[in-house]
Image (spheres, helix red, strand yellow):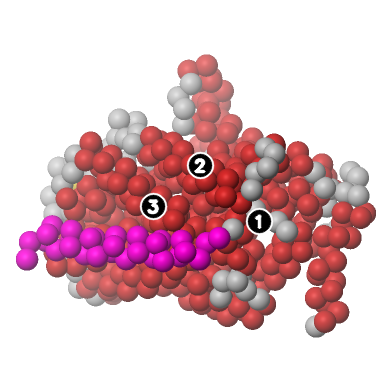
Amino acid sequence: MDTKVATFAILAIYIVIMVSIGFYTSRRTRSTEDFMLGGRSVGSWLTAFSYGTTYFSAVVFIGYAGQFGWMYGVSSTWVGIGNAIIGSLIPFFLIGKRTRLMSNHLGAKTMPEFFEHRYGSKALKTASALIVFIFLIPYTASVYNGLSRLFGMVFDLGEHGAVYIIIAMAILSAIYVTLGGYKATALNDFFQGIIMLIGISTVVILTVKEKNGLSEAVDALNRIKDDKGDTDTLGSIFGPDPINLLGVVILTSLGTWGLPQMVQKFYAIKDEQAIKKGAIISTFFAIVVAGGSYFMGGFVRLYCTATEGDDSGRIFIERGSNGKIIYDKMVPALLETAMPNILIGLIVVLVLSASLSTLSSLVLTSSSTLTNDLIKPRVKNFDDKKQMLVMRMFIAVFLIISVLIASHKNASISTLMSYSWGALSGAFLGPYLFGLFKKNTSKAACWASFITGVGISVTHMVLFSLNISAFDDLKKDVIDLNCKLNLLSPINAGAFAMLVSIAIVPIVSAFTKAPDQKVVDNAFSSLETSAKKA
C-alpha cells in the first residue's frame, strides 16, 4: 500500500475515535463544572495521562528536541529527566493535595478564581484571566507550528498546504473539546498517551539502530564539531554548554508549577489516593515521552547539517529569512531518514496525539478562564447553559488567533513556547506556590510577580523578536552584554522570570499587608481539617 494512502487511513481511524469520544462524553456534560473539571471526579490514570499529554506535544517532539539536540547533543536528555522529576513527580506530591483541597473548598474552577478567593481580590482574578488568555495563544501557535512541519514533510506540502493542515487540526480539536469539555479531553488524552508511549519508544530505537547502535552513534556524534568548533562534546554527559542547558531544564520543568493548564489537573482529580498513584504514572510517562524525545533529538546532527554543500549525506537545513537555522525542520528530517515508510503513519499519529491533547487543554483552560472569570461576573442571569455556549464560542476565537500566529513562516516553536511559559509561570508560580503554603502571602506580592513575570517576557519580546527599529541602540547594548553572559535567550529569560517570581513573593510579602484574616483562615481551613483527620 502507498505510504500516503496508509497514513491517511490511519489518520481517518484516529479522527473517528476522537470525535466519537467527544459525542460520548457530551451526554455526560451537564454543567459548567462538568465541562471545566469533569465534575472533580477524575481518577489517577486519566489525570496522570492528561497531565503528561498536556505537558508534551509537538513543541517537545518537533521543536525542542530538534533545537536542543542540535545545541547540546545527547546531554539534552537531562531536560527530559528534569521534566519527569521536577515537572511531574514533585508537583504531584508537593502541590497536588493542597491544590485539590483548597480549590474545592473555595469553589475555584480556574487559577484566576483561586487568586480571587485566596487573596480576596477580584482585581487579581481579572488581571490573571487576561494574562492566561493572552499568553496561552503563542503556546498554542507553537503546537500548530510543530504539526505543520511534520505534515509538510510527510505529504510534501508547500507553505500554503501547511496552513490548511493547521486549520484542519484546529477544527478537529475544537470539535471534541466543544462537545465534551474536560471529560472528552481526559478520555482522549488517555488514548493519545498510549499512542505516544508506543510511538516514542519506536522512534528512539530506530534512530539509534540506523546509526549502527548506541555506542557507534555516540562516537560519531563526538566527531562532529559543536557550534563553538569543539569535538568530543555532543556525545558527552553534560554537553558543550551546561549552563544554558540548565536554563532549559528550569524553564520546561519548574514552569509546570505555575501553568494554569497543568495545575488545574489537580482541581479535577478524585481524591488523595488518586494523586499518589497519578504521581508515579505521570513520572513514568514523562521519562518515556520527554526523555525519549530529547534523547532522540540528541542525534539530529548525525542526520542534518547546516553547512551548504556538505558531502556527508546528511540533510541540509537552510536558514530562514531572519538568518537563523530552522531548527523545527530537523526532527522531520531525522524521521524521514531513520523511519521505514511503513511506520510514517504511526509517527504522524504520534505527533498529532501529542499535539491535540495539549491543544485541547489549552483551549479549554483559556475559554473557561475568560468565561468564568471575565464574562460571568459582569453579566446577569448567566446560567450554566449560557456559560457553556460562551465557552464554546471562545474556543473558536482562541483557535483562530493561534492559527494566524502559527501561519507566520518565521514563528519559531521554541521562541513562542518560551515567551508563553515565561510570562505565565513567571507571573503565577510564586503567588500560587506560596499561596498554598504561607498565610502571610500578600496581594501586593501577587501584583509584583504578575508585573515582573509579564514584564520580563514582553521586554525581551520587544527587544529581540519584534524588530522595532526604535530600540536598535538599546538592543545593541543588551546584545553586547549577552555576548558576555549568554543568559538572554527567550528560554533563559523565561527561566529567569520564574526564579524572580519565587524570590519576589516572600520578600514583598514580608513588607506588605497580608490579606484579611477571615479570607486567609477560610482558605486554609480545608487543609487544617484534612491534617486533623490524618
- Residue 280 in percent (x, y) is at 55, 78
> Vertical placement of 239 versus 165: above or below?
below
Rate crowding at label 3 as few (under 14), some (14 to 19) or many (20 or more) other CA atoms within 10 Å.
Answer: many
Callouts 3 and 2 close, C-beta under 8 Å: no
**Does residue 303 belong to the magenta stretch?**
no
Q: Position of residue 282 (x, y in %)?
A: 51, 72
Residue 112 falls left or right of residue 207: right
Q: Earlier in the sequence, mark 2 or mark 1?
A: 1
- Residue 48 visible within the image: yes
User: Which of the pair 532/247 is nearer the observer?
Assistant: 532
| Between 297 and 409, the one nearer to me in the picture | 409
Mark nearer the viewer, 3 or 1: 3
* Mark sitting earlier along the chain (3/1): 1
**What number is the disc on residue 109?**
1
The answer to whether mark 3 and mark 1 are in CB contact below 8 A is no
SS of the residue at dot 2? helix
Look at the image and give the residue range highlighted in magenta: 1-30
Say which amino acid is labelled 3.
Ile
Locate residue 347: give its quadrant.
bottom left
Residue, far bottom: 534
Can residue 411 be seen here? Answer: no
Which comes sooner in the sequence, label 3 or label 2? 3
Q: Which residue is mark 2?
A: 394
Provide residue 354's location: percent of width, then percent of height: 38, 60
Q: Say what amino acid the circle numbered 2 marks.
A: Phe
**Amino acid carrying mark 1 in the image:** Lys
Residue at 65% over, 53% down: 110
Which residue shows up at 58% across the image and 45% down it?
386
Residue lying at 60% horizontally and 44% vertically, measured from the top left: 371
Residue at 70%, 71% (x, y): give it: 97
Instruction: Give residue 175's mark.
Output: 3
* Relative height, residue 233 to residue 455 (above, below): below
